Amino acid sequence: MSPAKDGRGLLLGFPDYADPARNLAAAAGLDYAEIAVHRFPDGESRIRLPAQLPGRVVICRSLYQPNDKLIELALAAATARELGAKHLTLAAPYLCYMRQDKAFHPGEAVSQRIVGKFLASHFDALITVDPHLHRVSRLGDAVPARRAVALAATDAMAAYLDGRLDNPLLIGPDAESRQWVAAIARRKRLEFYVAHKERAGDTDVRVALPEAGYQGRHVVLVDDIASTGRTLEAAGRELGKHGPASVTVMVTHALFISDALEHIRSAGVDEIWSSDSIPHPTNRIKLVETMAQALRDPG
Ligand code: R5P
């Protein structure tokens, strides 16, 4: 770990997201160093940062499987302040705990609000991609930091799609996906539709497709998160009944819990392209330029 050079900001990465973090630092014109993490046998973590830090520090970590990561992030942020950081930004391409935005049953924690306040208590600014905001429309309402930026993966997705499929037909599997599917369609002047989804349980999902000419078309399903994969599986199965030439999935956050991928593939999906917000073998779409632009922008 080399101390940061004077005058430039420093981006600190964690070992579980080191390559994208290093690339982000280079693209944003920041120096880079890696935070050393040691896990003790009892599950506690020891965190080590460079001994001297510049005034501007960005900590980059994708917050999938978040529980240990959140504690380590708090240790890193508090230590960064002690070592000289005056302005701390969290660059979290995947932001955790955004879906539990109300108490669905009496006594449930509203995790979005609690985790949001926790992050805002440590960081001056937050930059993330496609946070799952449902009943809350602004990221700043969920994470009340001085600056809270919600970027979209749609520019990177549109660029990746370019020239890969002949006249693709874009489908959003549910009402919430309209924002992403419409943004890509607008940029590329493509036809798009949004399906209707009903979810009866974690793995019990039904999707009804709108009337459209699917036969012989290269269909691309666009969504923000694939978790159990049941949304994309249900949409893929419905599409299969209409004889498309191919079905491709394009998704920002590749959580793909447990057997999610098998379920999606078993529905006749040919290709799965995810962004690198969460490291996964399906990563094809790089978010580095999208995130670097936001870091270069002083806000
Ligand atoms: C829901 O509104 C989201 O946009 C995704 O469609 C959903 O989170 C996907 O979850 P799963 O993969 O478990 O169906």
Image (cartoon, rainbow, N blue to C red):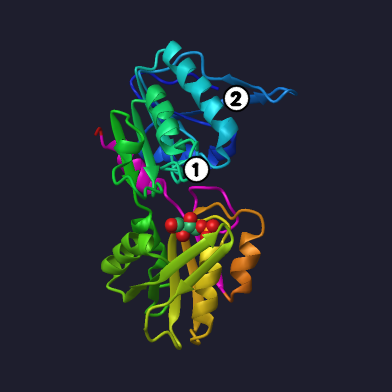
Does the numbered disc 1 mark a residue whose Cβ is under 8 Å from ligand 1? no
Q: Earlier in the sequence, mark 2 or mark 1?
A: 1
Q: Quadrant of the N terminus?
A: top right
For residue 209, which quarter of the picture? bottom left
Residue hosting label 1: 20
Q: Position of residue 198 (x, y in %)?
A: 46, 66
For label 1, count other residues whose C-alpha is less than 10 Å away and answer few (under 14), some (14-19) or many (20+). many
Q: Is residue 56 above or below residue 190?
A: above
Q: Which mark is residue 160?
A: none
Front residue (pair 265, 38) = 265
Q: Position of residue 267 (x, y in %)?
A: 59, 74
Give the residue drawn at x 49%, y 44%.
105
Q: Is residue 270 magenta?
A: yes
Q: Is residue 247 above or below residue 201?
A: below
For residue 10, which quarter of the picture? top left
Give the residue drawn at x 40%, y 46%.
131
Q: Quadrant of the C terminus?
A: top left
In the rendered structure, the answer to whether residue 251 lies left or right of residue 230 reads left
Q: Is residue 34 visible?
A: no
Amino acid on which disc 2 is placed: Ala
Q: Position of residue 120 (x, y in %)?
A: 37, 27
Task: Measure how far apart labels 2 and 1 are at the Cα level.
Answer: 16 Å
Q: Which span is picked out in magenta?
A: 269-297
Residue hosting label 2: 36
Amino acid on which disc 1 is placed: Pro
In the rendered structure, the answer to whether residue 97 lies left or right of residue 68 reads left
Q: Is residue 125 above or below residue 286?
A: above
Q: Secondary structure at mark 1?
A: helix
